[in-house]
Image (spheres, rainbow, N blue to C red):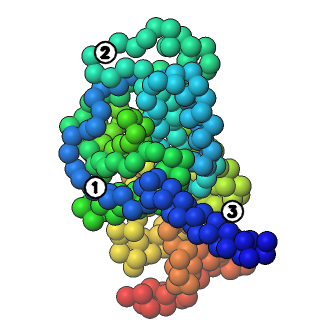
């Protein structure tokens, strides 16, 4: 008895290994994958689909639901995001069944069945230039192999040739998985839900950025809405620029003579309004210690700081 077991166990293990290897080979483990640029494997199609956000590994439930309604129809999946760049919960995809292709019309009963089950209906145009390849669809293991074998080659092909190809479509038809990524009219392959999700994410980002800026508004001179510097009016800016264009010494002598003579301050027209020379003096001559000398008050006896002002003028010149 023990001799018989010692012979049967190794034989069973060997048969299991051979069966497993044959199963993987049949599923496409060593199938040749040829990526090329050419015409699309499908024509214009109308399909029923459900849109989801989440990890792509969860799309199997939608495949099953769609296949149960129309078991004779070809299934289709559209993947809109690169899972290596977008986190799983934000990946967007649509899965469903092809109702009609080319000039054929969809079956009305099937169409109603899909709509009753919560599926939406959309159409993709026929395109002449796509990146495409195919992979055997024979077993469940074929679906797992497609991720490891097909997509790395598709991405490498697109990157090496610097192509703009998106989104990625999978069509399960006649024992094969047809892969394609359109090179033109990509926007026509985005179902309406994708645009709504993109708009929602953009609004969330804008509201988040607005809250960040408004939180720091008390310590900042920037607008929370546009990030534009909150300066004075255009006329005030023109007035400041006109004052800076006057030589410092000439400006100082003129302001000093006005003060010592007791004459009323002149009103000067700058841009579109009158600016008080005393206000301009306060806003433009406070940058250096020498300029601050022009703003010093009179001594207690009412005598201006004439000597100190003249020294400042000589220092500037």
* CA distance for labels 1 and 3: 56 Å
Secondary-structure class at tag 2: loop
Give how far across and how far down residue 193 sits, in percent.
52, 31
Answer few, some or many: residues within 10 Å of disc 2's Cα (few below 14, many 20 plus, some between 14 and 19). few
Tell me whether circle 3 and circle 2 mark residues in contact (CB < 8 Å): no
Residue at the disc numbered 2: 104
Q: Quadrant of residue 204?
A: top right
Identify which residue, 231 or 296, lies in the foreground.
Answer: 231
Q: Is residue 97 left or right of residue 5?
A: left
Q: Considering only order in the chain, which callout, 3 or 1, is on the residue closer to the N terminus? A: 1
Answer few, some or many: residues within 10 Å of disc 1's Cα (few below 14, many 20 plus, some between 14 and 19). some
Closest to the camera, between mark 1 and mark 3, is 1
* CA distance for labels 2 and 1: 29 Å
Secondary-structure class at tag 3: helix
Secondary-structure class at tag 1: loop
Please, is residue 109 above or below residue 194 in the view? Answer: above
Tell me whether circle 1 and circle 3 mark residues in contact (CB < 8 Å): no
Q: Considering only order in the chain, which callout, 2 or 3, is on the residue closer to the N terminus? A: 2
Please name the residue shown 53% across and 52% down the image.
141
Q: Which mark is residue 250?
A: none
Q: Which mark is residue 35?
A: 1
Please, is residue 186 above or below residue 124 in the view? Answer: below
Please, is residue 192 above or below residue 140 in the view? Answer: above
Residue at the disc numbered 3: 219
Please name the residue shown 35% across and 12% down the image.
105
* CA distance for labels 3 and 2: 65 Å
Q: Quadrant of residue 298?
A: bottom right
């Amino acid at each position: 008895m023990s001799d018989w077991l010692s012979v049967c166990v190794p034989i069973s293990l060997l048969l299991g290994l051979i069966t497993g290897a044959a199963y993987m080979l049949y599923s496409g483990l060593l199938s040749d994958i040829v990526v090329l640029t050419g015409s699309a494997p499908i024509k214009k199609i109308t399909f029923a689909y459900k849109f989801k956000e989440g990890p792509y590994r969860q799309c199997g439930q939608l495949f099953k639901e769609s296949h149960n309604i129309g078991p004779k129809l070809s299934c289709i999946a559209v993947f809109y995001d690169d899972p290596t760049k977008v986190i799983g919960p934000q990946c967007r995809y649509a899965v469903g069944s092809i109702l009609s292709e080319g000039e054929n019309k969809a079956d009305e009963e099937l169409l109603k069945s899909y709509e009753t089950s919560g599926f939406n209906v959309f159409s993709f145009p026929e395109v002449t230039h796509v990146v495409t390849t195919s992979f055997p669809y024979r077993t469940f293991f074929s679906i797992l192999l497609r991720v490891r074998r097909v997509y790395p080659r598709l991405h490498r092909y697109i990157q090496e040739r610097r192509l703009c190809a998106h989104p990625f479509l999978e069509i399960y038809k006649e024992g094969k998985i047809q892969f394609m990524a359109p090179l033109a009219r990509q926007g026509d392959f985005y179902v309406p839900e994708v645009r709504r999700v993109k708009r929602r994410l953009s609004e969330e980002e804008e509201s988040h950025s607005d809250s960040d800026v408004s939180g720091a508004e008390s310590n900042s001179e920037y607008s929370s809405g546009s990030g534009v510097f909150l300066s004075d009016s255009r006329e005030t800016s023109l007035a400041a620029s006109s004052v800076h264009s006057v030589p410092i010494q000439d400006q100082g002598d003129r302001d000093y003579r006005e003060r010592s003579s007791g004459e009323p301050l002149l009103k000067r027209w700058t841009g579109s309004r009158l600016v008080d020379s005393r206000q301009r003096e306060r806003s433009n001559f406070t940058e250096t210690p020498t300029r601050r000398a022009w703003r010093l008050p009179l001594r207690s006896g009412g005598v201006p700081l004439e000597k100190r002002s003249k020294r400042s003028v000589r220092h500037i010149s």
